[in-house]
Amino acid sequence: ADEADASQFATKFETNRTRAEVAAEAATVAQTRSIEPAGSRVVTYKSTADRAAVRAQAADAVRTGQISYGERG
């Protein structure tokens, strides 16, 4: 058995870099790397369809049973 705090996994680092050097490196990396998740941008689309025509097609599809309506699965 081991200690309850999992101290066997503690990592020790030996470094000779100053805090300023690390901060300067972090600043340059931040400028070249985006924190925005891939695929998170919204693509805009300009439709040429008429709203009334689309609503009529959807209503017709519901009437003929091609698509479901409401909470039916």
Image: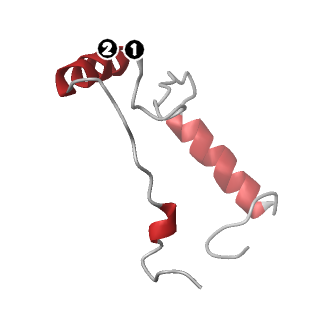
Q: Indicate the position of residue 58 as horizontal and vertical percent values.
A: 66, 50
Q: Indicate the amino acid at tag 2.
A: Thr
Res. 10 image quadrant: bottom left
Q: Which residue is mark 2?
A: 28
Q: Residue at x 31, y 14 (%)?
A: 28
Could you say whether the residue bearing mark 1 is in a helix, strand or loop? helix
Q: Residue at x 65, y 55 (%)?
A: 59
Q: Indicate the amino acid at tag 1.
A: Thr
Contact (Cβ within 8 Å) of mark 1 with mark 2: yes
Q: Residue 32 got which mark?
A: 1
Given residues 24 and 53, the one toward you in this image is 24
Q: Nearer the viewer, mark 1 or mark 2?
A: 2
Which quarter of the image is occupied by the N terminus? bottom right
Q: Indicate the position of residue 31 as horizontal and vertical percent values.
A: 32, 15
Res. 14 image quadrant: top left
Above or below, 17 against 72 in this view is: above
Given residues 60 and 10, the one toward you in this image is 10
- Within 10 angstroms of label 1, few (less than 14), some, or many (20 or more) residues? few
